Image: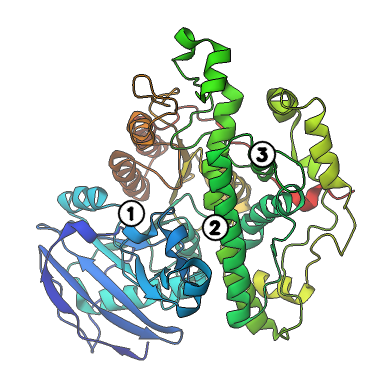
Amino acid sequence: MKKIKTPRRLIAVVASLGLALVAVPTVAPAANAVDACGLGETCTGALSGSLGDTSYQISMPAKFNGTVLLYSHGYRIADPVPAIVATQLLLDKDPNYSQVSVPELAAVVGSPVAYAGNNNPQVAPTAATAAALLEQGYALAGAGYARQGWAVAEGVQAGELLITHINSGAIAGVDEIVAWGDSLGGLVTQTLVQENPGKIAGTLPMCGVLEGPEQIFSSAMTILYTWKTLVDPSLKVANYAPGRAGYAQAIGDLLKVAQTFAQAQADPRAVSSVGFPIALSNFLAGLMAGLPTKSLTYDGISVNPELATLGLVDAATQGYAPLSAGQNSASAMAENVFQVMALGIMGRFNLEQIARELASIPADGNANFNDNVPVVYSDLLTIEQRREFEDTFNTIRPGLFDLMLGTLDQSVGSETARFPANPAAVAAVRGLPSAEPTYRKPAVFMTTTYDPVVPSGNTYSFFEDMTSTKAAQRAESRGMLKAAQFYTLPLKAEYTTFEPGAKSPSRALSIIAAGGSGVGHCTFTSAQHSNGVKALMAMIDAKTPKALAAAKRTVYRTPGVSRDRLFAPPPLKRPLATAR
């Protein structure tokens, strides 16, 4: 750490808080000790490291219990997103995004206004969770990152700087630091404890991208390549040019996707220029990528209750939807895929730029790190998916399902029709900081079962690998494995909700019915957050198998958490595993 800038003090205001758990033993203040943040206060400032400056925030409870929760925030899109798309993603209402002006966008979308991720610190996922944890006596700390985008290295360094700052006297009376975070922050959290095991007492990674960038962007590649083949051949998809030229290509893809989604929403029967139904092409893409068939609005089950009085024919001609569970699932996929494509396009551009720099890839060189040349896309579908949804496709046109899959598979092996990876780009991406599935510290993994952005298989795969290590097996044999995974579910199985007489469901009412649990990206209730923390603290302190089992029951008894201890989410879709 090069320098520590003096923090400024503010009276505690919880509304902008973010949460973090990191466990650190008490350390005597260093010679360069700083003034402690007072009880009931919020203190902010900046810390400097080799990767740049990082802002931080510390929020103190009225009565401190000795534990600091160190939070690492999730992915923030680094490059400006045009307002026309940013508003659909609600980035304009997110305090972690700032409005910027990009003059060249005016000629493309009629306005230079855009939104890009900023380095605001967070100490908790939500204000409600922050308030609850402060009430319980926890001190909350969190940092912004020196750079946004795929910023695991910056996130880890921010956490390290903040731990040093805390142990230099920024918080008095610290007994331990516990690390937690969600989405990209979940990966940062596990990497942080891997690099600093002696300073952290336990971890709570939530909906973490634990299988790394290749896995998460392979899902986006599956969707975008399906769109390029069945919907819009003009999409660039991968290997964006460096700098402003590449940014223009990425924005071009983003706008095309947004416009096509708007077209399909206005006319669910719209057909692409290639001759395939847009909505069903999108549905197929999401199924192959492993996205859930539930979204915040659509539960994949419910049909419009007005069908009972209108009759199927009338409902179909008048635009009432969903008419079937399959249509409900397809509508859910439309909501889910748009989020993934937006992140897949802008996130890929960002990561390819990083790969170009690290591997010194020339401007005309290939920066793609996801090889899809040998992928057999039809093999990404399970037998259960085929049986459940084949009729949804074939009712539109007999044989449509197989025709779409055949069209995708006919290009297998072609390095011109598909996207070969550059080994140098692959090596650069694999060389970025990542979490190894090793058992070092007590850990609670909490995951949204129906997460469209980070499929829940990320946690399951990582946890299974971690608990199969020798250290974990030895602990398990003594009944003292201090690690657990929990999956959340919607509070109601059928939560899609309609206003009386409405043709389409109400998103707001459906979200309320789902209860803020189990569906959407990293959506947890405050009770789930709080009990996750409570369970982790009890696991850290547990001295017997009985005490450890009691700690885990804390989460299982929380509303919305699956009580099936053998629960396994759908396995991750791994495209390269289909190569023949």
Q: Along the horizontal axis of the image, is 61 left or right of 88?
A: left
Three-letter code for the amino acid on which mark 3 is drawn = Leu
The residue type indicated by label 2 comes to Ala
Q: Residues within 10 Å of mark 1 (few under 14, many from 20)?
A: many
Q: Which residue is mark 1?
A: 125
Task: Bin the neighbour count of mark 3 within 10 Å (Cα to Cα): few under 14, some 14-19, many 20 and up.
Answer: many
Please indicate, yes or no, whether residue 436 appears anywhere in the rendered image: no
Q: What is the distance, in whole Å, between disc 3 and disc 2 at their CAs?
A: 17 Å
> Which residue appears at 59% of the width and 44% of the height?
457
Q: Residues at badges 3 and 1 in contact (C-beta under 8 Å)? A: no
Q: Secondary structure at mark 2?
A: helix
Percent across and percent down for residue 475 are 52, 46
Sequence-earlier tag: 3 or 1: 1
Q: Earlier in the sequence, mark 2 or mark 1?
A: 1
The residue to which callout 3 is attached is: 287
Q: Amino acid at mark 1?
A: Pro
The image shows residue 150, relative to residue 308, as above or below, that is below
Residue highlighted by disc 2 = 342
Q: Secondary structure at mark 1?
A: loop
* Marks 3,2: beta carbons within 8 A: no
**Camera-side residue of 227 and 503:** 503
Question: Which of the two labelled residues, at mark 3 and mark 2, occupies the earlier sequence position?
Answer: 3
Depth check, mark 3 against mark 1: the one in front is 3
